[in-house]
Image (spheres, helix red, strand yellow):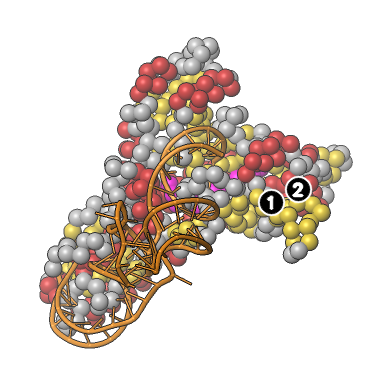
Amino acid sequence: MGKKNKDFVKEITPMEEDFSRWYTDVIMKNELVDYSPVKGFMVIRPYGYAIWERIQEFADAEFKETGHKNCYFPLLIPESLLNKEKEHVEGFAPEVAWVTHGGKEELGERLCVRPTSETIICHMYKKWLNSYRDLPFLYNQWCSVVRWEKATRPFLRTSEFLWQEGHTLHETFEEAQEETLQMLDIYRQVAEDLLAIPVVVGRKSDKEKFAGAYATYTMEALMHDGQALQAGTSHNLGQHFTKAFEIKYLGREGKEEFPYHTSWGISTRLIGGLIMVHSDNRGLVLPPKAAPTQVVIIPIAQKKEGVLEKAKELYEKIKAKGIRVEIDDNPSYSPGWKFNQYEMKGYPIRIEIGPRDIENNQAVAVRRDKLEKEIISLDNIDTTIGEMLETMQNDMFEKAKQHREENTYIMDSYEQYKKDLPSKPGFAKAMWCGCKECEEKLKEETGATIRCIPFEQEQLSDKCHFCGKEAKHMVYIARAY
RNA sequence: CGGGGUGUGGCUCAGUUUGGUAGAGCGCUUGGUUCGGGACCAAGAUGCCGAAGGUUCAAAUCCUUUCACUCCGACCA
């Protein structure tokens, strides 16, 4: 025994040493993704995709619960459609990919690979909407979009990413606003209840809002290294697109009306957030609800009589409880090897069962976030494990929340902030007058941006931290991914 | 787009300065002994040394060209 073959061991760069290397190591060594032949694109491997499926399942259930239906729109959008909403084209123009040929023929009109689907969906909605009786339109699609990025990182920023985009039409502004906020709250639940990532919810500044939106709402999470991550957005698009696309209907008063429009999305970026918030130097740590497999059973000395049988019995018992469980009875790896593998992969709970345990009617359970061995009785083991998973989920959320709070502070003065920023990353709360000049100055001088104007406001001062004029909002500021 | 770096079995690399016909560890295959924190023994399989051209009796190694990837700065969910 011993750690002889250490060359082969998949050591992960410690995050204190190089956060970015650490992140890549965790992703690559756990085989979540692989690099594709086309630069900036990513191949999502089965384990990475399984995490995405957890998110999909959770979010989709919420969408259905609130009356939404899924559909699918084409990948390619004619240039003329994209051009219909001016701010929108300008916002996305630098990063769209174009298709110019079909077979050998050059196309009369270029087609863009969707960077988002507002335009093509509006084009269809125009055909589908006739009367106020048809409203609301509550549709969503799960798909991928392409944005030609210069610098990419797996999950956080890739040229193609999987996401979900919901697009709704409503009779009134208020209804659209309600929908926008409702969907943001569902996203908050995905982040907090499923992924155990605490988020700050609020509105984006005009500078940071979606190209063509009336208002953009966001949830912002804080990563281990003190940088912020925009984890989901919901836009109230007003009538910008519906007017540009001439989506009209006959209203209650017999007059032609333009509906109010929303769109909202979350993407595989959430997986990047999940990794950066919870994981450690040994690899992934997955919250139980988001983990593809929640429990792995490792039989010890499995050739000895009764061990494998007992392990299988445990497996069946735990599985019957609705817990996602696996058993690893591969004889060619030692238990120590397996322990390390599953720790790296972030399996929430590992159960060891060997001859000694069977004699004592017990098993050893280890929680991935704590890594402490705990002896549990085989009686009611299914219930015990169920409870452990639940506690673990809550503990992970609390731990992340505590980290965020420890790294959130009130900006003293802007001058001081500039000095402190390199050594003190995290969320800074500050007052802002609302003008674009202050916002641009901040970005230019520090690289940090106004992440959002949180719904939960605090009156820190009545003067803008940047220009000293009358303050309108309290904002969260951070460097972002 | 500017600056640096790297291309050698599946992976991580050595070998390049000073040319001499391809190396290591791990992984993989087969068999056996093991199994409570990265086991061991034995026997195997795997390479147009990123690509093209040149110099030479001889090139992974020297020269030229080219391609790819990667890191750091400007832009972005």
What's under tag 1, amino acid-wise?
Trp
Q: CA distance from mark 1 to mark 2?
A: 9 Å
Instruction: Name the foreground residue: A322 vs B64.
Output: B64
Q: Quadrant of the N terminus of chain A?
A: bottom left
For image coordinates 55% across by 24% down, the residue present is A440
State the residue lying farthest toward the top.
A469
Task: Tell whether position A217 is magenta.
Answer: no
**Mark whose residue sits in front, 1 or 2:** 1
Looking at the image, residue A474 lies above or below residue A157: above
Instruction: Name the foreground residue: A248 vs A42.
Output: A42
For image coordinates 53% across by 11% down, the residue present is A469
Q: Residues within 10 Å of mark 1 (few under 14, many from 20)?
A: some
Q: Give the residue pinned by disc 2.
A: A79
For image coordinates 44% across by 37% down, the residue present is A228
Mark 1, chain letter?
Answer: A
Residues tagged 1 and 2 counted as in contact (Cβ below 8 A): yes
Q: Give the residue pinned by disc 1.
A: A98
- The image position of residue A299, as x and y in percent, is 22, 73
- The image position of residue B63, as x and y in percent, is 44, 51
* Secondary-structure class at tag 2: helix
Mark 2, chain letter?
Answer: A
What's under tag 2, amino acid-wise?
Glu
- The image position of residue A240, as x and y in percent, is 73, 37
Range shown magenta: A262-273
